[in-house]
Image (cartoon, rainbow, N blue to C red):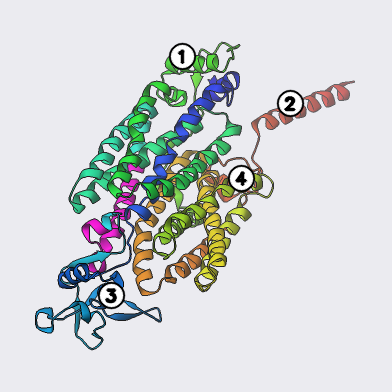
């Protein structure tokens, strides 16, 4: 019986055909970055204060500055030990009886009563528009901004399971097509719909399809390359996401309306519809569906594009897969080592999502230049992939994975206590934290696959990675609500969580140079030498020959 891996050796593990498909699928990570972290710009909350229509009219008539009218509208409040104009309260003044003229701009209202904003808000965001400024999602309605990211992650969570089933049931290619149709439609509807609640609904639909399509591509890509290229291709595929992170602030700087930015993010999915004719179905999936003839036809086309010829007669193809039907959730927690691996990996998926998304979204509230800060922090993601590729085969998985989390945690905590006056030092430390959590996020993916036995591997990765999406739901609330108490408080929480995650990773076994486990016994008793059938057969022959020779000697 011939497996697809045998056939792939004839076709070429990473030939011209696979490189073409890899290049096309990598483009999918570019708009995905805009979907994932676009809230920094689309949901940017600028400096804001209560609007008093009488004061605004007088400002326009008397040519006052914004500072003058703001001083007459809102009181000063204590924010982290500093007196600043309030964003959510205003002076309660009857200007009709008090009288407001061009000469009263110096009027002292410090003793006047205050109340919450009654009319609307003004924003220091001239010429630009985010959905926060369009729908006045500030103060008591600020939590609705968190929902924009939360609903996306709800979509991610459901989409991961749904498209995992669709891709296994109907194929990678048709699932990818379904994803792109939904992405294109929901992405554009999201840009034009006028009601914010409806926006949240379509945001969840958008997340559902985007994450499902991205995962389907990831699986397809790893299924058509040789074993020796899978990990490298997977890491580089994730690295292209970082390229999208660099492009995003440039787009956001020149596209001043969040709705048009959403159009630009969604538009590539119309282009990806053409991939239905440019990318083949996964031969591995076809083999698993007992469609070896179609798989062989696609593989022959790949060999032709790679300028290779199939020298062997591959008539019967099989796929080396475990018995996934026997896997159950209880297998992940029934035995001590499996239980330990599951809980540690779930916590690390959760931590990676919370800290990674939190650090990115924090750029939008850090009071610096959001475009430059975002660009700088995005640049530090690139070394992550190369550091992983350099260290995992020399040092191993466990130590780089653990220290990436610990460095991220230490950077977050240190950065929280660096004063704003030391801006560049604070920025450098924060970037080191971003690098660390990016490494941890990229490593948890393949470490997860190496710790579970074959028959439960897919289930284990699916269950553990759901904590990534749950972490994504929690992250915006953790960031924005805690930052309202103290701007640096989220960093301390992120740091503590990352520290714990790094410490827990040290409890995992090293998997460098270790064969993938095939059974739960391989996980529970890793030091027990597995019986090699070939060695057993050879030993049996040797014993038989020894016995025969002894008999012959005795008879002589």
Left or right of 341, for residue 510: right
**In the depicted view, which residue is nearer to us: 95 or 284?**
95
Can you tell which of label 1 and label 3 is closer to the viewer?
A: 3
**In the depicted view, which residue is nearer to us: 205 or 542?**
205
Can you tell which of label 4 and label 3 is closer to the viewer?
A: 3
Q: Which residues are magenta?
A: 133-161
Q: Secondary structure at mark 2?
A: helix
**Does the magenta run of residues contain 157?**
yes
Can you tell which of label 3 and label 2 is closer to the viewer?
A: 3
Asked whether the residues under the numbered discs 3 and 2 touch, taking CB atoms below 8 Å apart as contact, a structural biologist would say no
**Horizontal and vertical percent for residue 48?**
29, 67
**Callout 2 environment at 10 Å: few (<14), some (14 to 19), or many (20+)?**
few
Q: Which residue is mark 3?
A: 68
**N-terminal-most mark, 3 or 2:** 3
Q: CA distance from mark 3 to mark 2?
A: 97 Å
Q: Secondary structure at mark 4?
A: helix
Q: CA distance from mark 2 to mark 4?
A: 49 Å
Looking at the rendered structure, the number of numbered marks drawn on it comes to 4
**N-terminal-most mark, 1 or 4:** 1
Q: Which residue is mark 4?
A: 386
Q: Which residue is mark 1?
A: 297
Quick check: can you spot residue 504?
no
Name the residue rendered at 57%, 62% in the picture. 428
């Amino acid at each position: 019986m011939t497996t697809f891996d045998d056939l792939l050796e004839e076709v070429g593990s990473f030939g011209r055909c696979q490189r073409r498909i890899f290049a096309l699928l990598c483009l999918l990570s570019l708009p995905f970055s805009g979907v994932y972290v676009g809230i920094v710009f689309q949901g940017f909350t600028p400096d804001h204060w209560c609007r008093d229509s009488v004061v605004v009219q007088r400002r326009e008539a008397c040519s006052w500055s914004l500072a003058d009218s703001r001083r007459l509208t809102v009181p000063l409040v204590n924010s982290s030990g500093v007196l600043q104009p309030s964003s959510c309260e205003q002076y309660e003044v009857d200007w009709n009886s008090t009288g407001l003229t061009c000469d009263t701009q110096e009027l002292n209202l410090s003793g006047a009563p205050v109340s919450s904003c009654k009319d609307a808000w003004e924003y220091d965001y001239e010429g630009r528009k985010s959905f926060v400024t369009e729908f006045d999602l500030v103060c008591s309605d600020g939590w609705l901004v968190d929902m924009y990211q939360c609903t996306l992650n709800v979509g991610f969570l459901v989409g991961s399971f749904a498209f995992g089933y669709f891709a296994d049931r109907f194929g990678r290619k048709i699932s990818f097509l379904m994803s792109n149709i939904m992405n294109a439609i929901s992405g554009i509807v999201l840009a034009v719909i006028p009601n914010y609640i409806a926006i949240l609904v379509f945001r969840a639909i958008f997340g559902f399809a985007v994450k499902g399509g991205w995962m389907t591509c990831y699986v397809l890509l790893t299924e058509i390359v040789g074993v020796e290229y899978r990990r490298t291709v997977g890491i580089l595929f994730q690295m292209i996401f970082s390229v999208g992170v660099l492009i995003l602030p440039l787009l956001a700087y020149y596209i001043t309306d969040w709705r048009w930015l959403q159009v630009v993010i969604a538009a590539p999915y119309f282009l990806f519809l053409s991939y239905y004719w440019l990318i083949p179905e996964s031969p591995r999936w076809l083999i698993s569906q007992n469609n070896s003839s179609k798989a062989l036809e696609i593989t022959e086309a790949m060999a032709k594009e790679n300028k290779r010829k199939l020298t062997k007669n591959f008539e019967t193809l099989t796929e080396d897969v475990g018995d996934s039907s026997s896997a159950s959730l209880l297998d992940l927690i029934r035995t001590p080592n499996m239980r330990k691996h599951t809980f540690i990996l779930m916590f690390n998926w959760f931590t990676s999502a919370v800290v990674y998304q939190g650090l990115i979204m924090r750029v939008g509230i850090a009071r610096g230049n959001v475009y430059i800060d975002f660009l700088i922090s995005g640049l530090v993601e690139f070394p992550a992939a190369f550091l992983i590729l350099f260290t995992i085969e020399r040092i191993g998985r466990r130590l780089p994975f653990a220290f990436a989390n610990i460095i991220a945690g230490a950077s977050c905590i240190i950065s929280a206590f660096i004063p704003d006056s030391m801006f560049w030092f604070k920025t450098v430390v924060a970037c080191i934290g971003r690098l660390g959590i990016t490494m941890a996020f990229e490593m948890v993916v393949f470490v997860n696959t190496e710790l579970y036995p074959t028959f439960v591997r897919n289930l284990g990765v699916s269950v553990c990675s759901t904590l990534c999406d749950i972490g994504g739901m929690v992250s915006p609330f953790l960031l924005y609500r805690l930052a309202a108490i103290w701007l640096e408080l989220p960093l301390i929480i992120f740091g503590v969580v990352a520290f714990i995650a790094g410490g827990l990773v040290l409890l995992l076994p090293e998997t460098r140079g270790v064969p993938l486990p095939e059974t739960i016994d391989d996980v529970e008793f890793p030091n027990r030498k597995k019986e090699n059938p070939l060695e057993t057969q050879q030993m049996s022959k040797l014993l038989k020959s020894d016995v025969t020779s002894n008999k012959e000697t005795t008879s002589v």
